[in-house]
Structure formats: C-alpha cells, structure tokens
Image: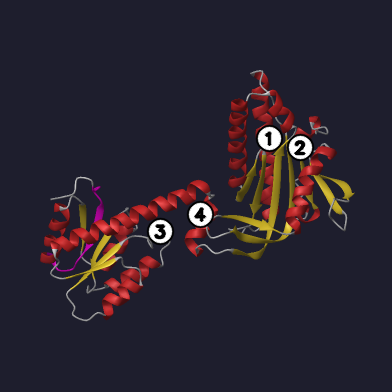
Amino acid sequence: MRDRRAKSARVLLVEDNRVNRLLLARNVELLGHQVEMVEDGLAALARLQQAAFDLLLMDIEMPGMNGIELLERLRAHPELRELPVIVTSALEGVDSVVRCVELGAEDYLHKPVNLVLLKARINASLERKRLRDQQRELVRRFATSEVAQNLEAEGFALGGRKVQATVMFCDIRGFTTLVESQPPEDIIELLNTYYTLMFAAISGHGGVVNQMIGDGLMALFGAPQPLEQPGRCAVNAAAEMVEMVAQFSAEQRALGRPEIRIGVGIASGDVVAGYTGTRQRATYTCIGDTVNVAARLEAHTKLAGRAVLLDAATRAQLDDGVVCEPLGPVQFKGKSCEVAVFALVSGADADAGPAA
C-alpha cells in the first residue's frame, strides 16, 4: 500500500519490451505515481524536453539510443542533468551498470524488478530530488539568478578569476537625516521599494547586485556572465535608476511623504571576481582598483552635485548619443593618480545639488 505521506510524482518509463513496460508501469502506478511510457532513448529525450518529470526509470539495453547514451545526453543538458534516474537491466555483467552510475544514475534495479526494492529506490530518489530542489530554491532566493546559474554550472569554489568588468556603487543621499525623521517601519518600506526599483534596472541591463548595506548597494556588470559592453550596460542601468527614482519621488511628494535622491558611481577595468569567505559562509563579489574608483565616484556625487559619475574607461564604451560632461581630473583619497571624472547628463541633475 502506498505511503499516504508520499507525494505523487511524474515518472517517465523507458522500456522497449512491451510486456515489461506495461507491468512495470502498473507497479509504479500502484505506488501512487503518474507514469508515462516511451519505447526508446530517442523518444525519452524528446519527451523530457517537452514536459517536466520527477523521475526517469529506464532500461539499459534499448534499440536506437541505449540507456548509457541517453544518460550522456542528459548530463550534457543544463536543464536535465539533475533529473533522478533509476536504471533497470537483466544483464549479468556490471560494466554497463557501473557506467550508468558514473554518468549520474541514482540507483539500479535488476530484472525482474522486486516491488519492495522498487518502492524503496523510487522513494529514496524522490527524497534526494526534493532536498536538491530545496537547496536550489534557497540559492535562488539569496543569490541573483546569474550567481545561481554560475553555481549550478561550475560548482562552488573559493577564489576568483580576473575579468574585464564594470562596477557600480549607489546610495540614497541624506539617508541618515531621513532615518532620524521617519518611523523605522516607514524606512523599511522605503528601502524595500528603493531596492525593488534598483534591482529591476540593474538586472534588466545584465548587472548583478552583490552587496547591500543599509541604503547602499554594489553591482557588477560583466561577471559572472560576460557582457560585450559592461560599461554601456551600467550607464544605461544608472540612467533608468535615476529616472525611476525621480518618478517615485514625485509620487512621494504628492502623498506628502519624503522624497529620495540617489548618487551613482561607475568605473570599468580589471577586477578579480569570485567567491570570498569560508566554506560555511561565502558571497560572490569582486576586488580591485576598479572597485575603489567606483566607490570614490559614488561618494564624489555629493560634492559634484551630479546623480551619476563615471570614469574614462566607462566613458570610452559609450556612443555619441549618451551625453557626458567632463568634470576634469580629481585626486581621490588613497589614489596615487588623479581620475578623470565624467558626469552623465540627465534631467535629474537640475536639482541635484550637494548633499550630506
């Protein structure tokens, strides 16, 4: 009898022998699962690409594409490589079975299939899948989609690699004063709205938000996924961020609520991007002089009275349709050389005077 606590699963059964296929399907259905049947590996691969299944139960010896070849195709497919697979075989030798396990098969059942073992193997495979799905969901909840994809594709390893990228820093001007004048619950709601808008603009242009501290955020363009023109993407995101904040502030003003303004600093160049921390707790981030320059540019927006400042390397990636005003070289703290600073010209700069 089926365990009432077990959840019904969708099982794809691949078996070329009609009698075996029908009998095995009946036994799986008696365990409370939904079964769909196909006769060979090619048909199975096509069906898996059309619909979602929780488990693949397949024979090793099949005409056309056998079980080993099907497993090789599945493991090369980014969306199917995690599908649990149980192989069945009447072969006496273990070489084929070993090869299937090496390719990622969860388990093995010898024909004729013992029903008690069938139930145990299916339940164990589905439980492992449930745990993997939960882990993947947690990663996606606490990491950006790009970082989650990078983890799935390459796995986790502390360290980084040198890449050409663009770094963005952004914060709310006068946030300390704002906190002092508003109830904490209103500040939390304001921050949640602010982050919603900023995330939408940044991710919409290929960026990854990898740090949030209070009202400030740091975003990376060009890692972990490469971008052809990360500087251009970052500037387009910044322009959208400023525009959305202006619209939001207009709504706040109409409701008699506090408005906000932002300052954005953008720099491009070499960075080392990867996972830092420990095996128990790590984050995806980047380091390098480019990061320092972007942070200094964001801080300088308060003195320059401009919403968005960028360095020469970022300016070089923009076409003539993007209007930037050169503000001249600036000697930033901690820098041995002056940095050429450019301001992105936008309507938001008209009332963007110096802010504390």
**Residue at the (66%, 63%) spot, across then down:** 163
* Gap in angstroms between the C-alphas marked 1 and 4: 29 Å
Q: Measured along the vertical axis of the image, is residue 346 above or below residue 13?
A: above
Dot 1 or dot 4: first in sequence order is: 4
352 to the left or right of 11: right
Label 2 belongs to which residue?
Answer: 346
Q: Measured along the vertical axis of the image, is residue 9 above or below residue 72?
A: above
* Gap in angstroms between the C-alphas marked 2 and 1: 9 Å
| Range drawn in magenta | 6-18
* Gap in angstroms between the C-alphas marked 2 and 3: 42 Å
110 to the left or right of 343: left
Whether residue 233 is in magenta: the answer is: no
Dot 2 or dot 4: first in sequence order is: 4
Label 4 belongs to which residue?
Answer: 148
- C-beta proximity under 8 Å, tags 3 and 1: no
Question: How far across and down, in percent of the image, does residue 24 sit?
Answer: 14, 61
- C-beta proximity under 8 Å, tags 3 and 4: no
Label 3 belongs to which residue?
Answer: 79
**Residue at the (61%, 64%) spot, across then down:** 159
**Circle 3 SS class:** loop
Question: How far across and down, in percent of the image, does residue 139 sit?
Answer: 48, 51
